[in-house]
Image (cartoon, grey):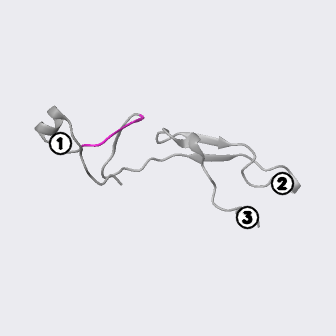
Amino acid sequence: MVQAVSKGPPSVDQSARGRETGTRIRRSGEGEAGLRGGPAGDLYIFIEVAEHPIFKRDGVDLYCRVPVSMVTAALGGDVEGALY
């Protein structure tokens, strides 16, 4: 029986930014240990992007609808809202 030993949660650096569902990231040497003391294998991370209640995706672009009055749109001003 083989038991996996975790070194902690895997970290995905900034290389995951802008990726779409179905993207595969390869991390060399960060997989499980090899057989009979061999080197560690590669770790493959498959990206799946979840839907967000505020932001919508169109390819790699993010969009958000925010209500703005005609006066603010024409003359400029501040728009407040919780975007989290």
Residue 32 drawn at (x, y percent): 74, 54
**Of residues 47 and 17, the one drawn nearer to the viewer in this rendering:** 17
Look at 31% across and 52% down and name the residue there: 53
Residue type highlighted by circle 3:
Val
Please state which of the two labelled residues, at mark 2 or mark 3, is closer to the viewer. 3
Magenta segment, which residues? 60-65
Q: Mark 2 packing: few (<14 Cα in 10 Å), some, or many (20+)?
A: few
The dot on residue 68 is: 1
Most foreground residue, 2 or 41: 41
- The numbered dot on residue 5 is 3
Q: In the image, 60: left or right of 8?
A: left
Q: From the viewer's perspective, is residue 6 above or below residue 57? A: below
Residue at position x 40%, y 34% from top? 59
Q: Residue 68 placed where, x, y %?
A: 17, 42
Query: Rounded to the nearest whole Å, what is the CA distance between mark 1 and mark 2?
Result: 61 Å
Q: Is residue 63 magenta?
A: yes
When the figure is inspected, residue 84 is found, relative to residue 24, above or below; the finding is below
Relative to 31, is 63 above or below? Answer: above
Residue 18's place in the image compared with 82, above or below, is above
